[in-house]
Amino acid sequence: MKTLQFLVIGKNQEILETLKRIIENNEGWKAEIQSDETASYDYIKENQVDIVLLSSGLEEQFEKDIKIFCENLDKETKVIDHYGGGSGLLKNEVYSLFPNLQG
């Protein structure tokens, strides 16, 4: 089974920690959380990141810029805009990007 590496970016620390817990409740899913937009770029460049999960509180321009940044990498990093909706919605968002993970 492929391990999925997430970077969750947002401004609300409580929400970030909750998303980390929800993600890591899935076998083979690992998450790092980040509230510093600038540091996010370096983290993505230096680490294997399969999914960048955009949470609440981010500036619209940063969201646009990070999507372009991820598209231009030599990696297959996907970006998900996630602003709530529970763990079922999150799984559906992930499975839509990685349909071969559904068992």
Image (cartoon, grey):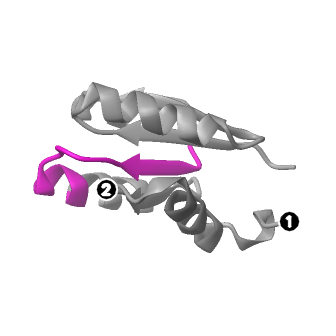
* Marks 1/2: CA–CA distance: 26 Å
Residue 44 in sight in this render: no
Horizontally, residue 45 falls left or right of residue 9, namely right
Amino acid type at mark 2? Tyr
**Which residue is under mark 1?**
103
**Which residue is under mark 2?**
83
| Magenta stretch: includes residue 32 | no
> Earlier along the polypeptide chain: callout 1 or callout 2?
2
User: Which range is magenta?
Assistant: 48-64
Q: Residue at x 46, y 55 (%)?
A: 86
Which secondary structure lies at badge 1?
loop
- Residue 65: quadrant of the picture: bottom left
Amino acid type at mark 1? Gly
* Viewer-nearest residue: 27 or 60: 27
Q: Residues within 10 Å of mark 1 (few under 14, many from 20)?
A: few
Residue 92, compared with residue 57, is above or below; it is: below
Place of residue 5 in the rendered image (x, y in percent of width and height, measured from the top left):
62, 40
* Viewer-nearest residue: 57 or 38: 57
- Residue 30: quadrant of the picture: top right
